[in-house]
Every structure is written in C-alpha cells, then in structure tokens.
Image: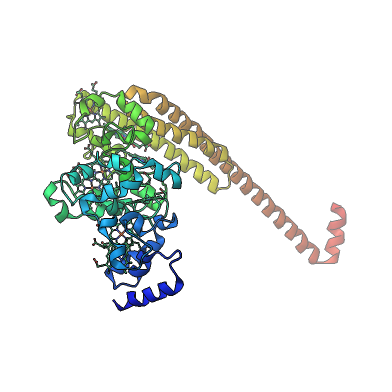
Amino acid sequence: MRAPAILFLLCSIAGAAAVDTCVTCHAALEEGAKGPATLIKGDVHTAHGLSCADCHGGDRTTDDQDASMNRAKGFLGKPARTAIPKFCARCHSNPDIMRQYAPRERVDQFELYQTSVHGKRLASGDGNVATCIDCHSVHDIRAVKDGMSPVHPLHVAETCSRCHSDKEKMAPYGIPTNQFEEYRSSVHWEALAKRGDLSAPSCASCHGNHGAKPPQVESVSAVCGTCHVLFAQLYDRSVHKAVFSGVGGGGGCIVCHSNHGIHQPSTAMLAGPKAVCAGCHDAETSPAKTAVEMGAWLDGLDGALKNSETVLARAEEYGMEVSEAQLRLIDGRENLVKARLAMHSMVSGEMRKPVEAGMAVAAETLKAGQAALREKDIRRWGLAVSVILIAIAILAIRGLIRRIESGPTAMTASGEKTL
Ligand code: HEC
Ligand code: HEC
Ligand code: HEC
Ligand code: HEC
Ligand code: HEC
Ligand code: HEC
Ligand code: HEC
Ligand code: HEC
Ligand code: HEC
C-alpha cells in the first residue's frame, strides 16, 4: 500500500481537479488489480470519455478507498458472471444514454441476447456460456470495426472457438466441437481470411451476433439464402425443399453442402463414388439418372470450354491475334455458371438453355482457334518458301561474284554480253 500513499500525496498536491481517483489509485496497485487501469487506455469507452465509475459506480473524486468504493453510495464492485449482460445493458439498452454518444447505435443487444442459447442458459444459472465480455473482452473493449476487436470479422471464429473447440467445456452439452476446424477448411474461410473478402461469412454472420439467429431468417439453415439469393430461389421451388425440411438438423442447402466444412463443389457431388445424391437415390432410379445426366452436361460444357481455351492459348503463343475469341470465352464460362445455378432446380431441362449457349460459344471459339492455327501454318509455309527463294538468290549471287573474281577477261567476255 506504499504506492497508493505516494499517489495520494501527488494527487493532493495537484489538487482535486479532473483527477479520476479510481484510475490513479488502481494504476498504482500491485499486478492483478492494476490490470484494468492499464488496459482501459485502449478501450472504446475511454475514447468516449467514460471511465471506471460509469460501469462500476462509486465516487471518482475522493482518494479515500472506502469512500470511493462505498456500496451504500452506489458502488457496484465486480458484477457476478450471471449479472454481466444486465450490467452492460444499463447503457446499451438505454436509448437516452446511447443517443448522446452514438445516435445510430443499436440498443437491442441485451434483448436479442436473451433469445439466444447463451442468454437462455445464463438466465438459468449456467455460467459456461458466453456473456458480453467473453466475446468483447473487458477493460479492453474495442469498436467492432477496430482490427484488434475480438469480434472483428477476421477474429470472430477464434473468439467463438475458445469455448466451442474446448472438448472439456462442451462435454456436458453433447454437441460437436469441430466447428472451427471444419470452418477453417471451407470455401468461406478461404474467401474471408485468405482473400480478405469481408462479404464471406464468419460464425456470427450465420448464427447472429447476439440473437439466436440473424434477422430475416426463420432458421439458421436458411441463412445461406441471405447471400446466395439466386440459389435459394431455385432451391425453394425444387422438389427437395419440402422433403429436406428437418434432414440433418436444419435441412436446406446444408444437406448437400454441409454447414461448417463447405468445400469447393464439383460434379463429383452428382455422380461417382462421392456423389451426395447417391446417399438417398439408388442407382437406376430416375433421380439418380437425372443426377448423372446433369453431371455429364456440366462436365461436357466444362471440357469443351477448356479445349477451346487450350487451342486459343496455343495460337496466342505463336503470336496469332485471338483476343476476340478469348473474350468470347468469358461468355461461355458465364453460361457454365448459369448451368450450375440452374441445376439447383433439380430439373435437368432447366439447364438446357445455358448448356446449349455455352456449347455454341465453345464450338465457335474452337473454330476461331483452329482457323488461327491454320493461318499460322500457311504463314509458316509462306515463310519457308521465301527462305528457300532467298537462299537460291544468295547462291546465285555468290556464283556470280566468284565468276567475277576469277579474272577480268572472263568478266568482259561474259559480263558485257549478258548486260
Ligand atoms: C485508494 C485506492 C483506490 C481507489 C481510489 C479506488 N480503488 Fe478500487 N480497489 C482498490 C483496491 C486496493 C482493491 C482491491 C482490494 C479490495 O477488494 O478491496 C480495489 C478493488 C476494486 C474492484 C474489485 C472489487 C470486487 O468486487 O472484487 C473494483 C471493481 C474497483 N476497485 C473499482 C473501483 C472504482 C470504480 C473506483 C472509483 C470509483 C475505485 N475502485 C477506486 C483501491 C482503490
Ligand atoms: C465497460 C464497463 C467497465 C469499465 C469502464 C470498467 N470495468 Fe472493471 N469490470 C467490468 C466487468 C464487467 C468486470 C467483471 C469481469 C469478470 O467477471 O471477469 C470488471 C471487473 C473489474 C475488477 C475485478 C478484477 C478483475 O479484473 O476481474 C476490477 C478490479 C475492476 N473491474 C476495476 C476497474 C477499474 C479500475 C476500471 C477503470 C480503470 C474499470 N474497472 C473499468 C466492467 C468495466
Ligand atoms: C457470442 C458473442 C457475443 C456476445 C455474447 C455479445 N456480443 Fe456484442 N457483438 C458480437 C459480434 C460478433 C458483434 C458484431 C460484429 C460485426 O458487426 O461484425 C457484436 C456487436 C456489438 C455491438 C456493436 C453494435 C451492434 O449491435 O452491432 C455492441 C454495442 C455490442 N455488441 C454489445 C454487446 C453487449 C452489451 C452484450 C451483452 C448483452 C453483447 N454484445 C454480447 C458478439 C457478441
Ligand atoms: C456507462 C454506459 C455504458 C456501459 C455500462 C457499457 N457501455 Fe459499452 N459503450 C457505451 C458507449 C457510450 C459507447 C460508445 C458509443 C458506441 O460506439 O456505441 C460504447 C461502446 C461499446 C462498444 C463498441 C460498439 C461499436 O461501436 O462497435 C462495445 C462492443 C461495448 N460498448 C460493449 C460493452 C460491454 C460488453 C459492456 C459491459 C461490460 C458495456 N459496453 C458497458 C456505453 C456503455
Ligand atoms: C464462454 C464460452 C463461449 C463462447 C465464447 C461462445 N459460446 Fe456458444 N455456447 C457456449 C455454451 C456452453 C453453449 C451451450 C451448448 C448447448 O446448450 O448446446 C453454447 C451454445 C451455442 C450455440 C447453440 C448450440 C446448440 O445447442 O444448438 C450456438 C449456435 C453457439 N453457441 C454459437 C456461438 C458463436 C457463434 C460464438 C461466437 C460468436 C459463441 N457461441 C461463443 C459457450 C460459448
Ligand atoms: C455458413 C454458415 C455458418 C457458419 C459460417 C458457421 N455456422 Fe455454425 N451452423 C450453421 C448451421 C446451418 C448449423 C445447423 C443449424 C441447425 O441445425 O439448425 C450450425 C450449427 C452450429 C452449432 C450447433 C452444433 C453443431 O455443430 O451442429 C454450433 C455450436 C455452431 N454451429 C457454431 C459455430 C461456430 C463456432 C462457427 C465458427 C467457427 C460457426 N458455427 C460457423 C451455419 C454456420
Ligand atoms: C454472409 C454471406 C454468406 C453466407 C451467409 C453464406 N455464404 Fe457461401 N459464400 C459467400 C461468399 C462471399 C463466397 C465466396 C465467393 C467466391 O468464391 O467468389 C461464398 C462461397 C460459397 C460456395 C463456393 C462457391 C464457389 O463458386 O466457389 C458455396 C458452395 C457456398 N458459399 C455455399 C454456402 C452455403 C451452403 C451457405 C449456408 C450454409 C452459405 N454459403 C452461406 C457468402 C456467403
Ligand atoms: C441436392 C443437393 C444440393 C442442394 C440442396 C444445394 N446444392 Fe448447391 N450444389 C450442388 C452441387 C451438386 C453443386 C456442384 C455443381 C458443379 O460444380 O458441378 C452445387 C454447387 C453450388 C455452388 C457453386 C456454384 C458454382 O458456380 O461453382 C453454390 C454457390 C451452391 N451450390 C450454393 C447452394 C445454396 C446456397 C443452396 C441452398 C439454397 C444449395 N447450393 C443447395 C448440390 C446442391
Ligand atoms: C437427403 C436425401 C436426398 C438427397 C441427398 C438427394 N435427394 Fe433428390 N430427392 C429426395 C427425395 C425424398 C425426393 C422425393 C421422392 C422421390 O421422388 O424420390 C427427391 C426427388 C428428387 C428428384 C425428382 C424426382 C422425380 O422423378 O421427379 C430429382 C431429380 C432429384 N431428387 C435429384 C437429386 C440430385 C441430383 C441429388 C444430388 C445433387 C439429390 N436428389 C439428392 C431425397 C434426396
């Protein structure tokens, strides 16, 4: 307690003006209790002029420990774990307070939190679940857009996985603990973390930040459609919409794509040993045949476009001008994308239009590539012939020179005659 004593002395010399005694005294304490006063420097609340007493209550103008932290005068101390959401909600659910600082800030975090599995379990006394500070940290709370925030899109997955990948902690609930591991192998993690595409989902995009599910979604399994709108429209009018409801938990896209470990789709999902369709449709049944047919169309178009691509690339290597055909190939690729999309209707007929349009592009660009290669051959022949002609001319001139050099008599004798 020697340090605080010195501090009190300093404080009294400086006078009471604008000194926050909670901060000054705590900053001088031993490790542990000193922590908050050090951490708080980077906290978003500090940046808005809020301090210890705004959260914990107490009197920040007196340097007397007992008077400062007097429970009778409203000091709250350290909140119990189950009381934390309400502790934060004192401000965050109060539009009158929040509007003074951030006019457009939401004030529904606590209300939504109470609808989540976390909130419900906490209300029943289970302290294992996430409270506000497990996701946002404490004394070092950052604005969401701050790259150091644990709920910044690039960090959310790690924050959730602190508990959800902890087998011991999750054991009482009997739910899987592989979400982070699976998610890290997915196309979404690839897009978000490796390509920096912030439109790709992290845990909270699909599960909601505070509530049980994101807005405009009747169940988490319907969340894919908030981003993949066109796929969802086709799926919704497909034969599977009704029969998948409830399959594998939530039904929907995740029956074929899974939820956390979504990998790059390919026609291997339609036909062959890894086909997802085969899980429900026996070979030789009509849906299985449809699956094989759809796979063959997609592979056929993909193969045809790749073939054109190769031929055009070869022509380009020889210096032929094929940029127009190469540009046209982009249309072909777009048709392949459209065909993959149309496949989600589960009606092979709906794929016909984009497949045929794509095939037409493939045929047309192949023709352009082959024509360019033929043209190259013709030019080569032309070149070869002119090389030969030039060689003959050189030989003839050499012969002539040699004759000239062989003697002046020969020169006048033959030279004058020919001229
Ligand atoms: C003169 C020094 C001093 C001042 C001023 C002071 N504290 Fe403390 N505070 C302490 C010490 C020492 C402890 C740890 C010992 C204890 O629990 O009493 C502590 C503990 C705490 C705790 C943890 C209590 C718990 O319930 O576990 C909180 C929260 C706290 N202080 C907040 C504040 C706030 C807010 C203010 C200003 C209104 C403040 N302190 C002012 C010295 C001080
Ligand atoms: C945004 C609200 C908020 C602010 C501002 C805040 N605290 Fe806290 N503080 C909390 C919460 C919530 C806890 C409970 C943490 C827990 O359960 O682990 C806590 C816990 C504590 C504790 C208990 C020891 C610990 O670390 O668990 C101390 C001491 C403390 N705060 C001191 C301070 C001091 C000193 C300041 C100002 C420098 C301060 N707090 C500012 C919310 C706040
Ligand atoms: C399960 C983790 C989790 C819990 C629990 C949690 N939050 Fe959040 N919070 C988030 C995420 C994730 C975001 C948003 C990140 C984004 O927008 O990209 C967020 C955003 C916020 C924001 C910014 C405004 C907004 O609503 O988007 C505030 C304020 C906030 N949380 C306060 C709270 C409070 C108060 C509690 C407790 C009642 C709480 N949070 C509980 C994860 C959590
Ligand atoms: C004394 C009122 C008050 C209390 C109590 C309080 N906050 Fe805040 N909080 C604010 C204000 C004011 C802001 C700044 C305005 C804003 O950005 O929302 C803020 C900002 C935030 C932000 C940043 C939001 C953003 O813009 O990205 C988060 C996250 C947050 N608080 C979480 C918490 C948590 C968690 C607790 C409880 C431990 C808590 N707050 C307690 C008033 C409070
Ligand atoms: C402090 C630990 C902790 C953190 C951090 C945490 N959770 Fe949880 N979560 C739990 C516990 C414990 C449960 C209860 C499990 C249950 O009831 O099945 C749970 C339940 C859930 C459930 C419901 C599971 C079910 O039963 O269907 C979802 C979804 C969930 N959490 C998502 C998240 C997301 C997303 C994040 C990060 C934004 C997160 N959690 C952060 C501990 C945590
Ligand atoms: C692309 C969307 C998406 C992302 C990203 C996502 N989830 Fe899920 N998650 C789901 C869906 C859909 C379900 C199944 C819900 C149902 O059955 O109703 C689910 C289920 C869960 C469950 C329940 C237990 C289980 O495994 O079935 C937990 C816990 C969970 N997710 C946590 C997480 C965590 C942690 C992350 C981040 C590492 C995450 N999720 C990322 C969509 C997603
Ligand atoms: C928050 C928006 C968002 C949500 C929600 C979402 N995705 Fe995605 N998804 C993306 C983005 C962004 C990409 C990356 C696109 C790219 O690679 O160009 C992507 C990529 C994909 C891909 C790979 C596509 C490709 O062409 O490489 C599949 C498959 C996929 N998502 C399926 C799903 C499923 C199934 C769900 C629901 C469980 C879902 N997504 C939820 C945004 C989302
Ligand atoms: C009946 C199984 C099934 C269902 C249900 C399903 N898909 Fe697919 N999906 C596939 C198959 C098979 C492919 C692979 C096509 C290919 O690349 O050859 C695919 C491919 C995709 C692609 C990649 C397209 C591309 O251009 O590479 C996305 C994105 C996608 N699906 C999203 C969704 C979304 C979102 C839903 C739900 C609204 C959904 N899928 C439902 C089977 C399904
Ligand atoms: C979870 C099981 C399941 C999976 C996986 C599944 N289906 Fe189905 N499918 C059904 C059920 C059930 C029906 C409706 C009953 C029926 O006609 O067999 C159906 C119907 C169909 C139909 C309409 C049948 C008709 O003759 O009108 C087609 C086409 C179809 N599925 C194609 C596919 C394709 C392609 C895949 C893989 C990309 C696939 N299915 C994956 C369960 C599944």
Residue 141: quadrant of the picture: bottom left
Q: Nearer the viewer, residue 146 or 199?
A: 146
The quadrant where ligand 8 appears is top left
Q: What is the x, y in percent for residue 282?
A: 17, 29
Q: Residue at x 50, y 45 (%)?
A: 313
Residue 192 drawn above or below residue 245: below
Q: Measuring from the top left, give residue 303's x and y in whole percent.
A: 39, 37
Q: Residue at x 38, y 63 (%)?
A: 61
How many numbered badges does the structure rendering display?
0
Q: Quadrant of residue 59?
A: bottom left
**In terms of depth relative to the viewer, which is nearer, 111 or 354?**
111
Residue 95 appears in the figure:
yes
> Where the N terminus falls, by quadrant?
bottom left
Which residue is nearer to you in this view: 371 or 288?
288
- Is there any visible trace of residue 76 in the rendered image? no
State the image coordinates of residue 211 (x, y, percent, origin top left).
28, 40
